[in-house]
Amino acid sequence: MSHYLNFIGQTFVDTPHGHRFSVTNPATGQPGASVVEASEQQVLEAVDKAHAAQRSWKKTPSAQRAVHMEALAQLLVQRAGLIGQALALESGKSLEDATNETMYAAEILRFHAQWARRVEGEIIPSDSPDENLLLYREPMGVVACLIPFNYPVYTLLRKIAPALITGNAVLVRPSNNTPTSALEIARCVQDSGFPGNLIQIMVMSHASAQRMCMHPKVAMMTLTGSVQAGQKVIGYSRANIAKVSLELGGKTPVIVEPDADLDAVALAIVNAKLTHCGQLCTAPERVYAHTSIHDAIVQKLHAAMLAKTHGDRATNASFVGPLVSASARANIHAMVQRAVAAGAHVLCGGTIPEGPGYFYPPTLLTHCEQHSEIVQEELFGPVLPVLRYTHLDQALEWANDHQFGLSSVLFTSDLRKAMHVANGIESGELYINRMPADPYQGYHAGWKRSGLGGDDGKHGMLEFTQTRLVVMKY
């Protein structure tokens, strides 16, 4: 079993008498590694170190920042197999998927490195003839990056890359479910030539994370997580009026019109739904099928789900992998049972399998109501309710009748229908004739309770900046 230390001050630091715990492989239920929580004092000292390092980093030309980022990207590529091994063990992903996630994370690092000469301010016309208005873009300072368990490698780089290129220092708290891949990335940081203390990665308790976030030298917090976690972060931000950027829950609606290719649609939906066992913020969570094709699409979805087998992806990469924990599985199963009690029909799945690991079979539900819990609350698992609608405006109304607004999907070959939904959907993203994929040159931002701010592209990069207006009289 591997034993990991925290990356503080450009080195790996032990925590005498610190709480050490095992990281469980969710496919087997067995411990695969151990980590130690940084002490509260270590966390606070890391904030001070990051603050001092950032004051020099912000004066470093952005082109030189990009050189460091390119070096880190190269190391991620070279060590993708090692990082992937740690990620596969802690998450239940296949080694191939975990390695590919690392490679993709290197690409987003390179993407933001290319913004080095494009972090631009503005010259704004003044009302006075002898005056200039200059708007600068400046770094926030120290940024706390709070990383989720589902895509911990990609999300870590998704957050620190734009923060670094714009001149910030970062403190990373990985999920306690998946911390080892982050600490493998720390080895790359150590060898990449980055200035010391600029990137620090620490496993910590909730209490220590709260102290970090409420530290007066932390200027910004960025989180991908649940609505409840986002509410806590907003609470932390009140102490110092720190900036927050939050990507929270999702409940992606998929609207299927009669003119869609039902065979292709069913396969796309099931593949997206079962990716990482449904533990994806933009995974399809509710399908609205036109009444004329409802029975046909349900039949095809059913067949596609029955063709999938759950199991340890270390033995067969085609298997549907595990949920993150026993409690996550218990919560999802309880939601399915409540849905059945309310009148839903289970066409497949809906049971907890015997044996080790936190598996849950692909589950398809019909006869669900729009107001029901299974349609309104985020599942984050391999369960899919299908509802029948009679006209597109009804489907659009139901898609919008929701607390979340992260991602949405429409399948149609009619351009007018596509534009109608594009102009009326209440979500940060709409995918037409494909499933969500979060292109990193776009902007991944949620409406409603799905978040504040966003990630990716130019606008995601600018989240990590603040402005200074200089009014110059001459």
Image (spheres, rainbow, N blue to C red):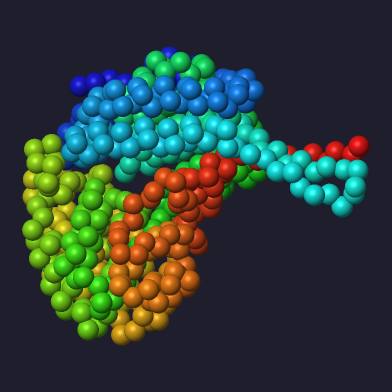
Q: Nearer the viewer, residue 214 or 64?
A: 64
Q: Is residue 97 left or right of residue 254?
A: left
Q: Position of residue 409 (x, y in %)?
A: 34, 65
Where 66 falls versus 356 (above or below)?
above
Does any portion of residue 205 appear in the rendered image?
Answer: no
Q: Residue at x 19, y 71 (%)?
A: 262
Q: Quadrant of the N terminus?
A: top left
Instruction: Determine the residue positioned at 45% across, 63% down.
Output: 427
Question: Which quadrant is the C terminus positioned in?
Answer: top right
> Which residue is rendered at x = 50% and y = 26% of the image?
66
Can residue 471 be seen in this snapshot?
A: yes
Q: Nearer the viewer, residue 465 or 339?
A: 465
Relative to 222, is 17 on the left or the right?
left
Residue at the (62%, 34%) spot, across then down: 139
Q: In the picture shown, does residue 340 fall above or below 166?
A: below
The location of residue 325, given as percent across then percent down, is 25, 44
Viewer-closest of 285 and 137: 137
Side of 50 where 410 appears, left or right: left
Q: Is residue 183 above or below residue 95?
A: above
**Percent x, y of residue 316:** 9, 41
Residue 328, x across and y down, in percent: 27, 50
